[in-house]
Image: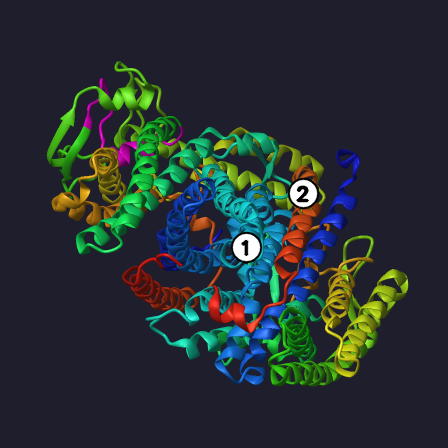
Amino acid sequence: MISSLDYATLQQLWWIICSIVCALFLFLNFVQGGQTLLWEVAKTDLEKSLVITSLGRKWEMPFTTLVLFGGALFAAFPKFYATSFGGAYWVWMLILFSFIIQAVSYEYRKKENNFLGATVYELFLFINGSVGILLIGAAVGTFYTGSNFTLDLYNRVTWNYTLMGINLRGLEAAFSLFNLSLGLFLLFNARVLGALYLLNNIDLSSTPDLESRLRKGAWHSFLIALPFLLYILISILFMEGFNVDQAGRVSLVPFKYLLNLLAMPHLLVLLLAGIVLVIYGVLSSTFKKSNKGIWFCGLGTVFTGLVILSLPAFNNTPFYPSKLDLQSSLTIYNASSSMYTLTVMTYVAIGIPFVLAYVVYVWKLMDSKKLTPEEVIHEESY
Amino acid sequence: MLEIDLSMVNWARAQFALTAMYHWIFVPLTLGLSFLCAFFESIYVRTGNKEWRDITKFWMTLFGINFAIGVATGIILEFEFGTNWSNYSWMVGDIFGAPLAIEGLFAFFLEATFFAVMFFGWNRVSKRFHLFSTWMVALGSNLSAIWILVANGWMQNPVGMVFNPGTARFEMQSFFEVVFNPVAVSKFVHTSSSGFLFASLFVLAISCWYLIKKRHIQMAKKSIVVASVFGLFSSSYVALTGDTSAYEVAQKQPMKLAAIEGLYTGETKAPIVAAGILNPDKKPGDNQDPFLVKVEIPYLLSLLANHSIDSFVPGIDDLVYGNEKEGIEGVAPKIIKGKKAINALAFFKQARQENNNQKAKLALAKFKENQKYLGYGYLDKPEEAIPPVAIPYYAFHIMVALGTFFPFLFAVFLFYALKDSLAQKRWLLFIGLISGFLGFIASQAGWVVAEVGRQPWAIYGLLPVKVATTNLAVENVQITFFMFLGLFTLLLIAEIKIMLKQISIGPEEGS
């Protein structure tokens, strides 16, 4: 069946697969969000241990998903991989640095003789959760606002945005209010998710202060995230966007993304459902003291993430537009791998549900009992 | 034509080498220790003896410390292809991206999911499921090695693809040819077993230290038995697969073989240099002796390279300047043909832009004549095709010498361990202690042979490293180079300090 799919279908399918991976990553960013809450919600050593151990059992999930996202883009859209990673050098480098320092921090923070001291490792976690997510948001924002590159006849990328004589290589993405707002929305949404996850994962019966701080943390972060979300949504509805015509010419079109939403009403439904789920998750945890908010907010984040990535890629839209040279813009059709490779990779993708199934199975098995203070004190913990 | 900033290329090279070498400190330990932990835990589950559980937990702690920094240093490698080698990523991403994606999907998730069970699941899941998880982590790490070595094997011996002039990139034609590439297969078996070997040396060295200090004697003795058995098997296998690897190199990358042997003038019945010091003044094509001193074993190189004593093994001079008698074409004519291919491709591209089908067709025909030599067209002179000889030469000889020593070491350890007289053999314990470090040297040397020996090519014979880079100002790469150097060094110091502390604390006994 897969071998009978045509090239365009495969290209669309692979953009959807990459979007799903990215959307799952945004959900799993509850780990990153939780990291930024550490100092705020955990005041005693025990509370800190509970928070870090609870997050520490999941830290590899967003990390691995990010690696998979990179691998999937490399395999399916190598021109994007080359153009964005090579072009926006500094954004990606800083994002990666923030993940490098995350990877050791859980394991090393509480170990004796750890050279840098627990506070530095906690700071590493904070940087990963804040700067890392903010920059990822800014990078995703460029799918809407465009980047400053040109591609030559051989698809070699040249990046050109200078400030006081220095080529910023992608850092200028953070100067756009839209990109910055998306980054801040993702950051505060991750904090909401982090707080809700911790409420769900830890047995808080003997640490009521931690519980109330977590509920407050979720609510406050949500209130801060809200205006950024509104700004993004309004901008998307009104902004000029990039369009590819039948002849492959890219031009700027007013209300492009609004037109896309109208042309793809299922995305509109998904977006609204996503936002409602996030709001319900937060409200139920804040006012009904529910501990299941993470699942609603998580699903809502996945839906919203899917829309954020699909909206600028389908309906004759270049997903990685160039402001500098419109005709260098990347679409899912001109940036993809060959038909052969996409077909092979689609066979490979049959494995995704199996991987998801065992991840979910093991997750449920490990989390069937809540994390207790006794466990953190007497057994393996971070 | 393309302008190349050579100093930027070299900084990018240095950065990749730096990050890869740091990563490779930890990865072989992960590959092998994961299996050793699985062995220890299997014995515990079978015997129910708590002592084995303590042994398992102790080695798992060290595994975890090592694993974290392995992951930290690993993420950058995947993305560095994009950030610093974007032209490479574009030109071969159609082939090279697939194994990386598969690695992420099938290997990393296995590791990441079951790692949490392995460390925190002792009282959360059943004993058997815990053991299963430990095995899954071992499987996951080794699966990841398969895919990354498929990718690397393809760089050494590009198969299963074709150059598409329309897109000006290489495109995959046969996934199975890429996966079952003989170079990839021999690389995987050689590299993963070298990881088992290194991890066995690691366990052996730490256990020797305990015996020297007369602490945790029972645990140390038990660990030595398991590590010696695993080490003996894996080191023998490393030697065996090393032979296959050398054969593959001789067949697919004759220049690399000539470099690692310091062979300038090819010969039949070629001897192998067992040990020797290179003449630093030797230049390709001159008449100087390449060696100041050397010890040779007759016929062995011909036998190793072609499995026949009478076979001809080409030297550097034959490969660069050609050898008509042996039917070897020199680099100079290949450069000329390569430049023709580059020009024809440019004409083809231009004609297509102008929608001039006639001109495009002619240019394409011209391109196809010389397409095989495309990569050579980017070289400026024939001597550029030679890797820096001294580095792979010495690295190879250090690796082989150590690789020959290790099986004997494990055999001796196993012998005395079974006689239960290890504790009295202090000289042997000290050798065991130092061997942990020797394992690290051999392991790094192996990659130096593979990667420095591959120069000047990113894709062997098709794409030189200098064309594979991202168009970046040199300062960017210099800054990231020093950022990596600083950060990774800090993390390495932290890792070593934590590791040493855990070793000095030792296993929890009787918990």
User: Residue B394's image quarter?
Assistant: top left
Q: Which residues are magenta?
A: B252-272
Q: Residue at x 35, y 70 (%)?
A: A112
- Seen in the image, is A78 located left or right of residue B218? right
Please say if A138 is above or below A344: below
Q: Position of residue B396 (x, y in %)?
A: 26, 38
Please say if B258 is above or below A382: above
Q: CA distance from mark 1 to mark 2?
A: 22 Å
By what rule are the colours in the image chosen?
rainbow
Residue A229 magenta-highlighted: no
Please say if A332 is above or below B364: below
Q: Residue at x 23, y 22 (%)?
A: B300
- Seen in the image, is B424 located left or right of residue B79? left
Which of the image's four quarters has the N terminus of chain A?
A: top right
- Graded by Cα atoms within 10 Å as few (under 14), some (14 to 19) or many (20 or more), the crowding at tag 2 reads some
Mark 2 lies on a secondary structure that is loop
Q: Chain of mark 2?
A: A
**Residue B386 visible in rendering:** no
Mark 1 lies on a secondary structure that is helix
Q: Chain of mark 1?
A: B
- Graded by Cα atoms within 10 Å as few (under 14), some (14 to 19) or many (20 or more), the crowding at tag 1 reads many
User: Residue B173's image quarter?
Assistant: top right
Q: Nearer the viewer, residue B350 or B55?
A: B55
Give, as a three-letter code, the residue at label 2: Gly
Q: Position of residue B162 (x, y in %)?
A: 58, 34
Give, as a three-letter code, the residue at label 1: Val
Q: Residue at x 66, y 33 (%)?
A: B361
Q: Which residue is mark 1?
A: B117
**Residue B148 visible in rendering:** yes
Q: Which residue is mark 2?
A: A351
Residue B255 magenta-highlighted: yes
Please say if B52 is above or below B309: below
